[in-house]
Image: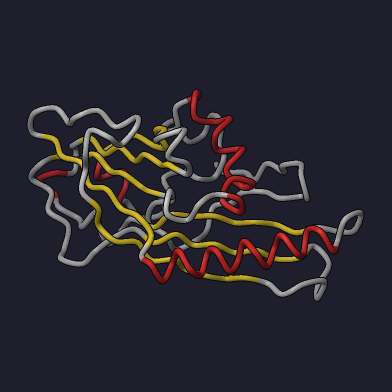
Amino acid sequence: MFYDPILSNWGIHLKKLTNLAVLACLVLVLSACGGIPLRSVPKLYALQSQLLDANPADFMVAIQADSRLTPPTGSAPVLSLVIKPTEAGAFESVDKKLAMRSSPWSASLKGLEASPPNRRWLVYSFTPESQAELSRIQAQFKRVKEERKGKSGGTVQIGIAQENVAAKNPELANTKWESWLQTSKADGFFELWTGTLGELTSKGH
């Protein structure tokens, strides 16, 4: 059972987006989505404001999976960002899918300890084009927020699709899958969701 908690600050909320195999439970489900560590919940609540203020070059997704899992060549997570006005026509809506690309793991990545035996890190960051697009969106909505002080706001829906990375493999269905997120190099990564590869790729998760 999923629900969409309403956040303060410009009436923004996070919501599960349909047809994305795994949103790493970016929906803020405190009890129904048991794969979210409780310590991560405050960081998820802060995500709506951080994304519109973050350095796009800092935003990264990290996945720890069984070392036997080899994602298809060129596959990477995609961040889906939808911003809509509460009052129709109040400002231009955004509906973007921001592509990511593979990045190497290193000990300098704060919060990501070396993977244990038989495990591996898959690390992803925005492509240059996605960084530029997010910068444009950030500038656009900083202007909107300033112009609409005291007026109706909008909603932000965020999802991270990983289905093209986590190809279905019956032999690995019961292996552990961890998703981690970074919005700031200074803060480092925090654990977003933990479960099995089978749960990740199961229909409707």
Count of all numbered marks drawn on residues in the image: 0
- Please report the residue visible at 31 percent of the width from the left and 44 percent of the height from the top: 62
Q: Is residue 134 left or right of residue 172?
A: right
For the view shown, which residue lies furthest in the right direction?
A: 150
Q: Return the x and y of residue 195 as percentages of the image width and height.
A: 31, 35
Q: Return the x and y of residue 26 as percentages of the image width and height.
A: 50, 45
Q: Return the x and y of residue 6 as percentages of the image width and height.
A: 72, 43
Q: Quarter of the image holding residue 185?
A: top left
* Quadrant for the N terminus in the image: top right
Foreground pick, 37 / 148:
148
* Scheme of image coloration: secondary structure
Foreground pick, 150 / 132:
132
Q: Is residue 81 left or right of residue 121?
A: right
- The correct choice, above or below, for 122 with respect to 106 in the image is below
Q: Quarter of the image holding residue 87?
A: bottom right
Q: Return the x and y of residue 60 as percentages of the image width and height.
A: 38, 48
- Please report the residue visible at 26 percent of the width from the left and 39 percent of the height from the top: 177
- The correct choice, above or below, for 197 with respect to 72 in the image is above
- The correct choice, above or below, for 83 with respect to 118 in the image is below
- Please report the residue visible at 8 percent of the width from the left and 33 percent of the height from the top: 118
Q: Is residue 71 left or right of residue 28?
A: left
For the view shown, which residue lies furthest in the top direction?
A: 39
Q: Is residue 179 left or right of residue 57?
A: left
